[in-house]
Amino acid sequence: MRLPIDTSAVNFVAAGAPEPAVDYDTKSPKTDETGRPIFNVHLFAVGGGGRDVITVKVAGEPKGIGEFTPVKGLFRNQWGRDDAIRGARIGLGQLTPPA
C-alpha cells in the first residue's frame, strides 16, 4: 500500500550527495519500471517540534540538492505476504530546485 505523507510543516535539508541504490542480492544498480536509475538521498527533516534524518529513494538523477530542499510526492510504501508487513520504504516523487 502506498501512503502519501504531508510535508507542508516540514523543512528538508540535504545531508549529503545522492548515492545509487543497489539491489541487495545482485549488488547491481536499481532502476524503476522505466529504466531510470534509483538514488538514495539522505535528508534532515525539521518541523512539527522534532527533527530526524531520513533516507528516501528517488528515481532519476536528483536535482535541487541545496540548503533547503523542497520535496514533492513523499510516500511510504509497505510490502508483505499473508497480510503481514515485511518491510517499508520512504519514496519521493521528486526533489525540486530551491527558488
Image: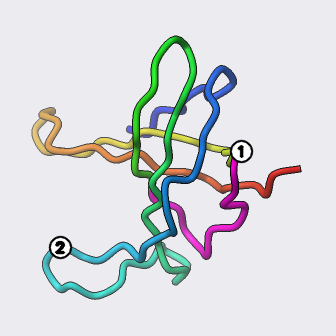
Q: Is residue 39 above or below residue 82?
A: below
Residue 42 colored in magenta in the image: no
Residue identified by numbered label 2: 24
User: On the rendered image, what quadrant is the N terminus found in?
Assistant: top left
| Residue nearest the observer in this picture, 57 or 18 | 18
Mark 2 Cα-neighbour bin, 10 Å: few <14, some 14–19, many ≥20: few
- Three-letter code, disc 2: Tyr
Residue identified by numbered label 1: 70
At a point 70% along the width and 67% down the height, the residue shown is 63
User: Mark 2 or mark 1: which is in front?
Assistant: 1
Disc 2 versus disc 1: distance between alpha carbons? 29 Å
Q: Is residue 21 above or below residue 9?
A: below
Q: Which residues, given as a range, are shown in magenta?
A: 57-67
Q: Position of residue 45 (x, y in %)?
A: 51, 34
- Three-letter code, disc 1: Pro
Residue 65 colored in magenta in the image: yes
Mark 1 Cα-neighbour bin, 10 Å: few <14, some 14–19, many ≥20: many
At a point 46% along the width and 18% down the height, the residue shown is 50
- Give the mark nearer the N terminus: 2 vs 1: 2
**Is the stretch drawn in magenta largely helix, strand or loop?**
loop
Query: Which residue is situated farthest in the top direction here?
Result: 49
Q: Secondary structure at mark 1?
A: loop
Q: Position of residue 2 (x, y in %)?
A: 44, 39
At a point 54% along the width and 68% down the height, the residue shown is 59
Q: Position of residue 17 (x, y in %)?
A: 51, 68
